[in-house]
Amino acid sequence: MVNRIARLLLESGAIESGDFLLASGARSSYYIDIKTATTNPAILAEIGKAIAGGWDFEVVAGVAVGGVPIAVAVSLAGGRPYAIIRKEAKDHGKSGRIIGDVNGKDVLLVEDVTTSGGSAIYGIEALRAAGAHVDRVVTVVDREAGAREALAEMGVSLQALVRVSDLLDG
């Protein structure tokens, strides 16, 4: 059974066949283009509502670039603040890796796609270093390629709106 988010992703053409190098360094015969899919406001709004209504949190955070629009959509749907995690700290202005107040807060980290969990691990480490409590990551699509296990080693659960098997079998 394919859920509503999976159906929207499939209908938008977010699943592409070919030979792709993933951010994790792995090669894949398919690519899940959530970034382009979330430029569609209807898809982004559905993702935001699904996440905002599914989990308790004080602040939602996303790692730039893919997690940021999702964090904003969740923030708007849930009426709670969001934070942005930069890929690297800047050395000018207020500097730092985090934009937003996460210190002492229960933060839900959101991701577009998880494979090995590298981006989520980076985000968790940055949030924890800033004083946030993080024990959950919600991803739009879990590629089912090790992220769940890697995050569990950090005491973090991974929940997915869609599993890649839902998309490939759908």
Image (cartoon, grey):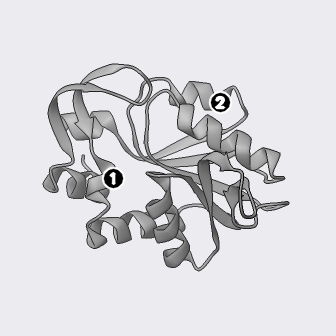
Mark 2 or mark 1: which comes first in sequence?
A: 1
Quarter of the image where the C terminus is located: top left
User: x, y (%) of residue 53?
Assistant: 52, 68
At x 67% / y 38%, what residue is drawn?
156
Nearest the eye: 32 or 149: 32
Instruction: Using the numbered discs, state the Cα–Cα distance from disc 2 to disc 1 in whole angstroms.
Output: 26 Å
Residue extending furthest front? 92
Label 1 crowd bin: few (<14), some (14–19), many (20+), radius 10 Å: some
At x 25% / y 27%, what residue is drawn?
20
Q: Is residue 119 visible?
A: yes
User: x, y (%) of residue 141?
Assistant: 38, 43
Nearest the eye: 79 or 3: 79
> On the image, numbered disc 1 is attached to which residue?
35
Q: Is residue 53 visible?
A: no
Q: Secondary structure at mark 2?
A: helix
> In the rendered view, does 33 fall on the left or right side of 109?
left
Residue extending furthest top? 26
The kind of residue tagged 2 is Ala
> In the rendered view, does 122 fall on the left or right side of 50?
right
Quadrant of res 121? top right
The kind of residue tagged 1 is Lys
Query: Above or below — where is 42 with respect to 127?
Result: below
User: x, y (%) of residue 112?
Assistant: 42, 48
Numbered badge on residue 152: 2
Label 2 crowd bin: few (<14), some (14–19), many (20+), radius 10 Å: few
> In the rendered view, does 39 fall on the left or right side of 71?
left
Front disc: 2 or 1: 1
Query: Above or below — where is 28 with respect to 86?
Result: above
